[in-house]
Structure formats: structure tokens, C-alpha cells
Amino acid sequence: MDLIGKRMSDRYEIISLIGVGGMAHVYKANDIILERFVAVKILQPQFNADNDFIRRFHREAQAATSLHHPHIVNIYDVGEDEDTYYIVMEYVEGITLKEKITQEGPLPVEEAVEIMKQVLGAIEQAHANRVVHRDLKPQNILIENSTAKVADFGIARAASSATITHTNSVIGSVHYLSPEQAKGSVITHRADIYSLGILLFEMVTGSLPFKAESAVSIALMHIQESIPMPTDRRYGLPQSIENIILRAVEKDPDDRYQTAFSMKEDLQTSLQESRKNEAPYIGFYQTLAMASVYTGPDAESEETKILPVQAVTGPREDTSGRKKSPSQKNSWFLSFLIVLLLVFASIVAAFTFVPEILSVEDVNVPELEGLHADEALERLENKGLAALPEEVTIEDRASGETTGQLPAAGSSVKKHSEVTIYVNDLSTMDLAAENGSREQNGWTAIWTELLLPGNVQAED
């Protein structure tokens, strides 16, 4: 569809194509009312018939318009023109961070740290407004005169299970995917922290930590494997920078930086002389690796030694013709008794403790109707239950109010079961606390799409 020269909504005159993506094309345009250049992101035509996606697209884009920060690409408008849906954004001269890394290779450490601090400032602002990006990658970071600006807030979240299979846009994102996103688990703001750790790795080494022939393989690496040591990829990299990367990309979100602010604060002092050669970071996976290393004698450095002949301690035939002493008989009887007691204790433990460990606790579903969705989520979490939010529209109920639930309050269910909550306008929910059931549906579709023959092309 040729849009050059077209005027969207009698206001935005399309000048040229400046970017192509799986979900949308981006054009440079002239805002004839405010007389300024803008960037117009126009959704691909195949999404027009997906009402669920369009609804979510509008809602998430509108939420992103509330974000104002020097390092966030501003969203000015969201609109529709003859079944063409678009977002109007700030026009940024310059290149993407991906293009910069491709052209220049590993960035000077000082420059990489400065860019990351700017990006973290933007993410800190977004998280404070309960917006999780979910698709942080260098393609979504624009660089203009040494200033970084983060784009595409909310767009990744708009991709539902019904629409994600329309596009291979996930392929470029899989390199920066958090383990919990790859597994379809609960997504919080700490997923962004992981992606930023991968991004910092790429900036200082000029390469991605994981490469494979398929996107599925890369996603599995994020789940199962530790990233390579950045100092192995770049000689002379300050230890402090490696430590920050390793902490940001911990598999367990609880082991990462808990906020963008804390990661930025650590970066502030990372290039001080006293920190450049600090002790290496020892994370969970590094600890496991160290524990598995055999620390006995080095076979190559030790001389060959002859082991002394040990006396056989087990029972053997007595050829001397002498009778065994009472003490020997008592010793064998005592050993037999101890073994018998151990076997008996194991059987008792198996029937007493194992069923208790394997059994799943029953819990009562709490009363949720009338609560704000965020409070309902918290109550379910306290009970060890998962929430499955469903949006409804009821004019005489408050926005964000829980209008119903299934199973009903007081029902007995197994711990970790899902409880459907019906929320009046989901956009008011705390994005950092929302249960991952919806996300899981989307990533299930992604895995299905990636596993289809011919659909997998990992980014170089």
C-alpha cells in the first residue's frame, strides 16, 4: 500500500518511509496544523480485522501518551483513517542503537554507560507510571546527538494471542527476551531489567550473548543457560561493568536489580578507579558451577602413587579352624540391626512425609467482587492463587472494579489454581502486578508460530 503523499485524517501528510517492522511501518510526515515533522506508525493491514487487537492497541497507546521524559519518544496522537490505524510520535533524527552497534562495533565503555543511564532513566519513569515496556531492544532505542530515546512503549503489550501469529516481529526480540517471558510466566517490570542487561552486554561486546539457528533455541538458552562472561568477549572490560550485566540477567527475577533506579545507581559509580577491578559477581548459576567443580589433586601434577593394600573388612571364610569370638558375632548382629532400623525409618518416612510434600494444599477463594483489580490480585497472590483477568464494560461500575469472579467466594480449590476475575476496564490494572495468564496465552501462540516449518529465522 503506497501511502506517500497521502494525508491521514486531513492532518498528517506522509512524506517518506523510514522504518519497516512486523507489526507496522513508520513514515516521516508533516503535521500541517502544528507545522512540524512527526513519525507516523501505521499498522499492517492484516490487523484491521482483529477487533481485540485494535481495542488493546488503542488502550495501550493511550496509556503510553501519559509518559513524558527527555529519553522517551513522545506519543502525540492515536487515530484511524479509512480503516487504517496509526500512532503519531515525535520525529527523531538519527539512527537506532542497533544500527550504531552494527556500524561501530563495541562502543567505548564510557559511551555505553552513558546511553544505558539515559535508557534506565526512561524505564524508571515508565515503571513509576505502571507501564512495562516488554520489548526493549536496540531497534527500539533511537540515538540523536548522543541522546538516547526509547520508543514503542505499550506496543508489545498490545500483541494478543490472536494477533501475534500474524507477524514474525518476535524473531528480532527473542535475543533480548527474559526467561519468564520465554516460559509464559508472570511478567513484571523486572523483565525489562533482564532485557537491559542483554542490551548492555551487546553494547560493550558488539555481539549478542546467545546465537543459534532458530529463535526457539535462543529462547531456550535464555531459560537454561548462563550468558558468556562479557570479559571473555572484550579484554580489559572493567569488572564492575561485567558485574552489573551479570546481576541484571539473573534467571530468577528476585536475584536481579529490583528497580531501574538501583541499576542506574550502580552504573553511576561503575567507572570509578576503585571499582574497575572489584571482586567478580557470584550469582546463583555461578555458585552452582563452582560447587560442581572437583577440587581434589590435579591428576596431571601429582606423581603416580601406589595405594596401600587395604585389609578386607567384609565377611570371609575362616580357614584357621578357630571359632569366632563373641565380640565378632555381636558386631555383625549390631550392623544388621542398624541396617534394619534404617530401612524401617525410610519406609516410615516414605509413607509419612512424601505424601505431605507431594500433596497440594486446598485453599478457599477469597471474596473479590467490589475490590479494585490491583487489590483483588494481591488477595489472590496472598492465597497462592493465580488471577485470570477478563475485561467487561459496565457503565454504572467504577473503572478497574472487580465485578465478578469464578469460582465463587468461599469455594475450595487447589493452591496455584486460576481464578477468573471480571474487571471493568482492564487498563487501570497495575501492569507490574498483572498475572501472566494473558501473557502466557500470547507466548503459547508465539511458540506455536516459531515451531511451524519455515517461520524461524533468528536475527544475526
Image (cartoon, rainbow, N blue to C red):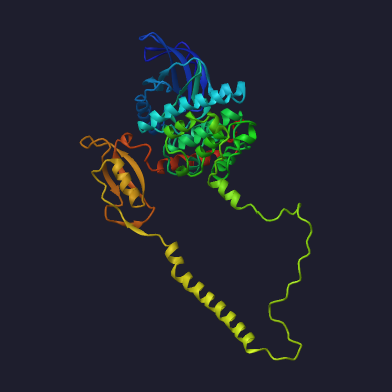
How many marks do you count on the picture? 0
Viewer-proximal residue among 451 and 400: 400
Residue 317 in the image, given as x and y percentages of width and height: 73, 85
Asked which quadrant contains residue 331, the reply is: bottom right
Residue placed furthest toward the front = 274
Q: Is residue 428 shown above or below 110?
A: below
With 124 as the anchor, is 214 left or right in this view?
right
The quadrant of the image that shows the C terminus is top right
Vertical side of 9 occupied by 112: above or below = below
Q: Is residue 44 visible?
A: no
Residue at left offset 45%, top offset 44%? 254
Q: Quadrant of residue 337?
A: bottom right
- What residue is at 50 percent from the left and 34 percent from the top? 195
Q: Is residue 217 left or right of residue 84?
A: right
Residue 64 in sight in this render: yes
**Looking at the picture, does residue 353 appear above or below residue 378?**
below
Question: How far across and how far down the image is residue 196, in percent?
Answer: 50, 32
Question: Who's the residue at 46% across and 31% down the image?
Answer: 264
**Up-down relation of residue 298 to residue 241 (above or below):** below
Measured as percent of width and height from the top left, residue 92 is found at 47, 16
What x and y, as percent, mark residue 168? 53, 32
